[in-house]
Image (cartoon, helix red, strand yellow):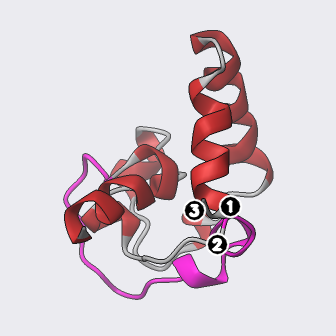
Amino acid sequence: MDKFEEILEKMSEMSENQLKTLIEMQKKRICICRECPSFNECMNENKEGLFCILGNSGCGLELIECNCSECSTHINFQMKYELYCIEGSEEEQRSKKK
């Protein structure tokens, strides 16, 4: 089990309120999605971010550049994939690639 799988397991044990609080805190503290050149006004208005955990964007977007691999969440959780705003969360991409 790698670091990402450990984190997912811990998250599955949290209550819905705990998980919601954690996600909002992570969006504000460590998420770099808003700094990505591809992040757009629709994503901003919908308060989207943390795509690596939450999945792809509901907004249409033009891929300008991807900075997922520079994110501390990506590094610390030993994530393998990128383009989360388009391709889906780390968990979704892992399940597609199996």
Q: Residue 68, percent across and down?
A: 53, 76
The secondary structure type at the circle numbered 3 is helix
* Residue under pointer 1: 3
Closer to the eye: label 2 or 3: 2
The residue shown at (57%, 62%) is 34
The amino acid on which the numbered mark 1 sits, given as a three-letter code, is Lys
Say if mark 1 contacts mark 2, CB within 8 Å: yes
Q: Residue 83, percent across and down?
A: 37, 74
The segment highlighted magenta reads: 56-77
The amino acid on which the numbered mark 3 sits, given as a three-letter code, is Arg
Q: Is residue 42 above or below residue 64?
A: above
Q: Nearer the viewer, residue 3 or 38?
A: 3
The secondary structure type at the circle numbered 2 is loop
* Residue under pointer 2: 78
The residue shown at (40%, 54%) is 91
How many C-alpha atoms fall within 10 Å of the one at disc 2: few (<14), some, or many (≥20)?
Answer: some
Considering every residue shown, the one lying at the far front of the view is 1
